Amino acid sequence: MAIDFSIFVEYGPRLLMGFWLTIKIVISAIILGMPWGLVLALGRRSRFFIPRLAATSFVEIFRNTPFIIQVFLFFYVLPFYGIRFPAEYVGTLALAAFGSAYFAEIIRGGIDAVSKGQLESARAIGMSDWQAMKNIVLPQTLSIILPPLTNQTLSLIKESAILSTITVNELTMSGIRVQGEIFRPFEVFIMVALLYWGLNESIAFLMRKIEKKANKGRTTNQNIAGKNTFISRGASR
Amino acid sequence: MTEETKKQDNFLQLKDITTTFGSIVALNNVNFSVKKGEVVCLIGPSGCGKSTLLRTANWLTPPDKGSVSLDGVIVGSESNKNMSLNEMKVLNGIRAKMGMVFQQFNVWPHLDALENVVRAQLVVAKRSRKDAEQKATKMLFDVGLGEKIHDWPDNLSGGQKQRLGIARALAMDPVLMLLDEPTSALDPELVSEVLNVLKRLANEGMTMIIVTHELGFASQVADRVAFMEDGKIIEEGPPNVILKSPKTKRLRLFLDKLNITSFTQS
């Protein structure tokens, strides 16, 4: 089967439209999901029972059910309660909820990786729990969680393809539609795959740059730093 | 005894403290108080409860039973174990006045030396950045880190880190210092630089409780030495009495052991 390059030129723009929507959806999902993930992470280590239960339930439910089922639930169940959004909004919300459960676990792991003495010394000097988190613990968490956050972001981009099942006209859906018109699956899905791959590769590249920057300034002398070296320091204040 | 002298005698008061960790009794109905300006050294074998006692003072390890007060103000008591946000606020205010120094230093590696000393002044004491930096610079000079104010903690030696920890606590103008084995994690040749800072503080009249294994240091700075074992204070008194002529057999055994180790080491 010969590749017909003219298809790239002719239908490329339509796929790019879908690609652009994918980017918008994923960025919105991250903007919504990360702060919510932080709230969930802090909720899970709250000293009060109710927030702890609520946060834990949320995380466990979204981590332990298939994303496609979550998408269906959001898409078909919300209208029963009179909540009607365009499909791409529902999809973004579902992706944000799904992502936040993983973000929460990553952030929680990062907080746990900062030694207990850091939080203790902050509390002992009179900081409230939140002040200690914000000033002392979370900045040290940042460089620990950057690599797993990157992974999760890449995985969200790939999961966003599932939104095609609820009529969101993102990259995968655009591909399916074009293919339905011209019956050239090879050219179409190669293009789709290349676009996903290019996006993920650029994000991974960018994040590696940021990681390097975040680790700069710390441990100019690893020998003296001794046992503290594994605790990365965030970007300087 | 007038009210005033009573208050002075019980500047810090720990009353009927019992703390358990699972089946382990860390503190067994301990009563302990410190006068204003007094330097008390807590000694005893590891696991005897001295660190727990110290951490009870600022409610870092809330006990199962008992209460703590500082200068007549309740720091915490068994009745308010589930503190309201308001009570937490009061506690945070009191903690700010109790400087704590840790065995593992616990300096903040993502902040440089100056910012380590500045941060709590801004966040807790609500000082302006200018005032806080001025104060921090002075404190760092006082502990001999004047040359290091923009160094990262990772680049400091253990002794320097500990002095940074002390400067961080002192910048809050504490009325009481709690020191949990401040020299135990240090290389032997770095111990004296930290002890010298503490000696100076003692001479300036700072009220201090020091958990330590440095008996020589204890005998020099302490007004009182308290020996603990199995979650109880077994014997206490002036250092020359306690360390030279112990009354109880347990303290005698403990001191003998320490002397033998220091002999074999030297």
Image: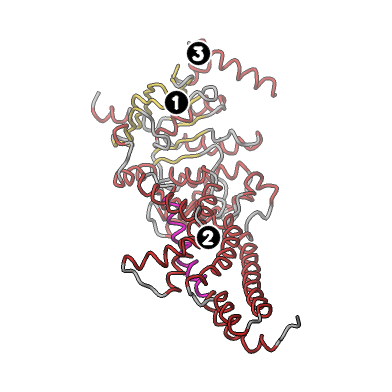
The residues tagged by marks 1 and 2 sit, at their Cα atoms, a distance apart of 42 Å
Q: Nearer the viewer, residue B131 or A11?
A: A11
Q: Which residue is mark 2?
A: A237
Q: Which residue is mark 3?
A: B246
Instruction: Identify the chain of the residue marked 1, using the numbered disc in the image.
Output: B
Image quadrant where one finds the N terminus of chain B = top left
A159 in magenta: no
Q: Is residue B216 left or right of residue A53?
A: right
Assign a secondary structure to mark 1. loop
**Circle nearer the viewer, 3 or 2:** 2
Tags 1 and 2 in contact by the CB under 8 Å rule? no
Q: Indicate the quadrant where residue B61 lies.
A: top left
x and y, in percent, of residue B38 in the image: 41, 30
**How many labels were placed on the picture?**
3
The answer to whether residue A209 of the structure is visible from this angle is: yes
Q: Residue at x 54, y 50 (%)?
A: A109
* Region rendered in magenta: A24-43
Q: Which residue is mark 1?
A: B223
Is circle 3 on the same chain as circle 2? no
Q: Identify the amino acid type marked 1.
A: Asp
**Residue B117 numbered mark, or none:** none
Relative to A68, say whether B22 is above or below.
Answer: above
Q: Residue at x 42, y 37 (%)?
A: B60
The residues tagged by marks 3 and 2 sit, at their Cα atoms, a distance apart of 52 Å
Label 1 crowding class (10 Å Cα cut-off): few <14, some 14-19, many 20+? Answer: some
Instruction: Identify the chain of the residue marked 3, using the numbered disc in the image.
Output: B
A31 in magenta: yes
Assign a secondary structure to mark 3. loop
